[in-house]
Every structure is written in C-alpha cells, then in structure tokens.
Amino acid sequence: MIQKYSERSESNLLLKVINLKTNFYTESGVVNAIAGINFSLNQGDTLGIVGESGCGKTVTALSITRLIKSPPGKIESGQIILEGVDILKLSRREMRKVRGKKISMIFQEPMTSLNPIMKIGYQISEAICLHQGLSKAGALNKTVEMLHMVGIRAPDKCIFNYPHQMSGGMQQRVMIAMALSCNPRLMIADEPTTALDVTIQAQILNLMQKLQKKIGTSIILVTHNMGVVAEMAKNVIVMYAGRIMESAPVEDIFERPYHPYTIGLMESIPSLVSVKARRRLRIIPGNVPSLFNLPTGCKFSNRCAKSYSKCLQEEPPLVSVSPSHMCKCWLYV
Amino acid sequence: MSKKNLVRTESLFKYYPIMKGVIPKVVNNIKAVVDVNLILHQSETLGLVGESGCGKSTLGKLISRLEEATHGKVFFEDENILEYSNKQIRKIRRDIQIIFQDPYSSLNYRQTVGSIIEEPLIVHFPNLKRSERKEIVKKLIEDVGLRLEDINRYPHEFSGGQRQRIGIARALMLKPKLIICDEPVSALDVSIQAQIINLLQELQEIYNLTYLFISHDLSVVKHISQRIAVMYVGRIVEIAESKSIYNQALHPYTKALIAASPVPNPKLKRDYTILDGDIPDPLSLPDGCSFHPRCPYAFEKCRCNVPELKEIEPHHYVRCFLFE
C-alpha cells in the first residue's frame, strides 16, 4: 500500500547539503569535481541541477547516494543531512539501508543500469524484499502493482521479461518502478530521459510528475536540457567547474538570469517557439574547461564577456541578488 | 529567385532483409525508407527530423550512396546518380559530403588533423603539389575556427566540438555542393552546439552550400533550416516551412513531436495529451497508416490504407487522411 506522506508540523526541509567537496585522485593530479557546494531541498519539491560536461552535476548525485567509487574518488568534507541525519557519517551498512529505501536513483541509460541476466520482476522484488522485509510472493505482488503504476501494460507478463526484450522507454519505466518501490523520500534522476526519443521523454517526465504528486517523493533532477528543467523543476541550480554559479526558483532564473554563464546558456538555445527570422545564436566563446586546468579566480572568467581584473584574481562568493536568488559573480557583490 | 533543384529523390526505398535458415532465405524486411520523394533546393537547408528508426539517417546515406537503395532514383543536378558507374561515383563524392554525429569515432585516431583534412585532396586531386595542398588546408583550418598549430596534433587531443570542426573542414576540402549533416551537434554540450550551428551557417554563406540537416532535435532543426521534413517509420509525413512548423503543423505526429519538445520557459503550460504507446517495431508495422495506433484522430480508413503525401497548402505537404 502506497501511503501519502504526512506533512511535518515543523520544518519542511528534507535534504540539506553543506559545503560538499568531492575529489578524484588521478594519475594526472587531483580533480576538485565538487569544490564546496550548498543547497537544500524541501519535501515534495523538485530541484533541477543543470550544467554541461564536467560541471559536477552527476558527481553531486553520486555523492548524495554515496556511490562515488573510492578510489579514485573521495567525498572530502561537508555534510549531507537527510531528515536530520548526516548520511556521510553513517557506516557502509547503515548507508545500504538508506540507499533504495530513503534515497533511490535513476540513471541515464536504462539498458546499462538494469541487470541483463535477471528477469525484471526479480530485479524489482529483490529491492523490496531487502528493504521492506516482504516475502518473495508479497514482493512480487508489490512489483506488479508498481509496474502497473508506471504505465506498463500487462505487468503480470512483464515481470518475466529480460531488459533487452523491452524498449528504452519501457526500461526507464522499470527503473522508475524500482526506484519508487520502497517509497523513498528522495529520488535522484540523473539525465533520465537523455537517451530516449522526444515523445517517450514526454511520457516519462509526465509519469514522474504524476507519481511525485501521488507518493510525495522529492526529486533531484540532473540534466543539461534547459527545457526539461523549465518543465519539471521548482528550483534550479546551475553548476560550472564543480561550483554553483547561480541558484533560484525556476521562474526567476528563466525570467531574469544573473550569472553571465546562465545568460550565455539561455541564449545558446535555439528557440522552437519564436517566429522571428533566423539569426545567429549568441555563443559563449571557448570550451568547457578541463578540471585539471582551471583558471585562477573565477572559473568562468576566461570565457566571460564581462570579466575584469578582480575576476582573474579571486573567486567570487555566492551572494543573494534577490530573495531566494543566489549568484556567484563579482558583478553583484 | 527561382529555386533550382539540387537533389530530387523518386520513390526511394531501402529494405534490409532478414535471413533465416541453414540455407538463408529472406523471411522479412526492415522497411527503413519507404517511398520517399524529396526535393532539395540549391543553397537551402532542409531539415530532416524524426525519432529512432524513422529512417532519416538511412535516407542521408542513400542520397550520398553510402548505402545502396533497394529501389528508386536519386537525381543530383538532374542526373540519376544511382545509375552511375564507379568512375562517375568518384566525382559525386566531391560534390556530396557528410558530417557525422560522433566526433570521436568519425576521425582516424592515428592520423594527424592535417593529414585527415588533406587526404581528400590527395585522393581526388593527385596532381596538386604539396605546397598547394598545404595552402588549402591552412585556409580551411582557419575558416572552421581552429589554429594553425592544430594541424600536427591528433584527434584525441581535442574536445568534441573541436573534433566536429575537424570533420567539417574535411567535408569542405573538395568544395562540395551538398553536405549531409547527420546529427552533427547531438553529441555536443549546449554552448558548443551553438558555436557549431553558427559555424555551419557562416560556412553555408561563404561556400554557397546546400545542407540536408538530420536531427531528432526540433528546435535545432527549426533554427537552421528553411524547410523541415518530418519522418515516421520510414515515410515522410509532413514537409513545411520551418517558420510555420510550430503554429501550423498539420500531421498529428508532427503536432505530438512539437508538443513533446521541452521548451525553456516555465510559464508556457503545454496544452496537449501525451502521445501514448511506443514507436512500432519495424519488423511488424501496423497495417494502413503506420501512425494510426497512436493517433488520437485515427478512423476506419487509417487502419486499412496508407495516405499519400499531398500538397495541402502552397509548400506544405501532409500525409494524412484528415486532409483528403
């Protein structure tokens, strides 16, 4: 039985990340994949983490679930407080109880995330048995219920399928069923629709929204697609080179972006809607930097049209530019 | 200004046979491209859009003769290039070039950038002197936004966007008339996508190129193309001018595709019903119109017959019984 979450009388806060730092120790040197980020998420909300390759968004998702492969990765410092408990301080055994039950994750390519030699039904019920202590039969019943909830036709037959017998869209639905089967407080979706066709993407996003309303799960959605963020997220953080450059509620960030990188990203996107004649896109010059070779000072300074001497010397702090809108840029300090 | 037809396909088909049995027999066909009649005007960009398995990449390969058509004709400058001899095909390879999706696998990792870009010249113009070749390479390197020093480096030393620039330089070497761009920006980050899109547009003006721009991303296609052709499971279902595609799309599938494309505007509440179901298995296509099982407007005729592609308004073609 899926139960609706009960609203707590005190704070609505589900997750608070404080000064998180994750490094990777490679042969070529240390990479500061996440260089000290802070954000929070309220119950029932969706947070969009947006950015390009190497910005640290996937590492953030993996850090929260403590799935960073160690070595070479290491969560250096910081706190990840989930429902009042700092999960970075939990033992591996305790964390295994949290993963799958309180926090679950959907990965980008469903084909490589599902076990190819295990039938779907068994994969999902395995998690349910582990976390909810149901019998095999009970877990299988719950599995059929979940598959039905994610819109799979003939779920009682589907449980006997292998992943390769299903389309990409169906595999992702299975992943979502698996992720939601234990009624998690938080679901982290890392580019869940990037590998899918557009019409299937729309189905999956719509499904995630419906299920969120039904079960009350909070979602962290990692993506590079601004359109997906606009549709799904309540709040947005924009990452670049392991740092949060801007964070705001979704309407604010699209209506009035502050950081030159955010503005550059918005202007780089061709518009489906506009009827104006085709003009050139406004581009951000240069390339996404290698994390081995970041500029001193502000990490965006070497590509920024508005950078000046201070930007090259010192990294700006994250400051408030309007209520709930933060920006990491010397222009606003 | 009269629009000259650079390319015209006539009843183009591509079937991939499925063989079974110890003595192999054809038991079924994957109908990748079905009865495509497409025209590309000189100097235009025609966008070809659709989802997995619609046949858009295959169509691009048929036109460039990287794949051989099962049936039909491809007229390039009014000559059917499918009937060309091997010698004649070599000439076509100068006029029709391709840029591929994956900047990592489309470049030979054992060749320097200079060598990759120079190779087409060596093959097609063996009488050119080395110094003349170097001059042409230098100019092109700069045109695509790379630096002279990059000539001696290897592909793995470059980012995805830079590698795509190398691929573009290679395609431009022989001064082609037509470039088939097969998802050239899909594998790139958003900010780099924009750079490459701008570059392609600039080069089109400088070199008077015609593009067949294949992509699954409707926003990109709309931005760069004058006209858009929409494909579904091997057939063209709509052709329209890109400026009118958002508001005046006619085919239910095109409308679904537009509705499903996420728009970076949180205030825009999309008014649509999500398209149900999956893209059909190419080995067992539905009877009649391939879209009818998912179409909210399907009626009896759609289940039994395949509609024809008809010009409903000037320059606007639709394949749907709703408009007959």
Image: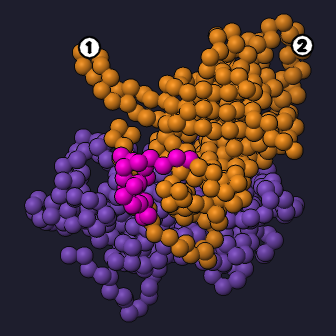
Could you say which chain is coloured purple in the image? Answer: A
- Please provide percent x and percent y for residue B241: 70, 54
Q: Nearer the viewer, residue A62 or B251?
A: B251
Q: Please, what is the three-letter code of the amino acid marked with disc 2?
A: Ser
Question: Who comes first in sequence, dot 1 or dot 2?
Answer: 1
The quarter of the picture where residue A92 lies is: bottom left
Given the image, what chain letter belongs to the residue carrying mark 1? B
The quarter of the picture where residue A224 lies is: bottom right
Looking at the image, residue A239 sits to the left or right of residue A218; the answer is right
Quarter of the image with the N terminus of chain A is bottom left
- Residue A206 higher or lower than B197, as above or below: below
Q: Secondary structure at mark 2?
A: helix
- Please provide percent x and percent y for residue B37: 60, 37
Could you say which chain is coloured orange in the image? Answer: B
The residue drawn where x is 73% and y is 43% is B45
Task: Determine which of the numbered discs, if any, sits on residue A230 in the image.
Answer: none
Is any part of residue B84 visible from this angle?
A: yes
Looking at the image, residue A50 sits to the left or right of residue B15; the answer is right
Looking at the image, residue A260 sits to the left or right of residue B139; the answer is left
Q: Which residue is mark 1?
A: B23
Q: Nearer the viewer, residue A17 or A178?
A: A178
Does the magenta segment cover residue B148? Answer: no
The residue drawn where x is 61% and y is 65% is B263
Q: Which residue is mark 2?
A: B131
Quarter of the image with the C terminus of chain A is bottom right
Q: Secondary structure at mark 1?
A: loop
Given the image, what chain letter belongs to the residue carrying mark 2? B
Q: Which residues are magenta?
A: B287-309
The quarter of the picture where residue A117 lies is: top left
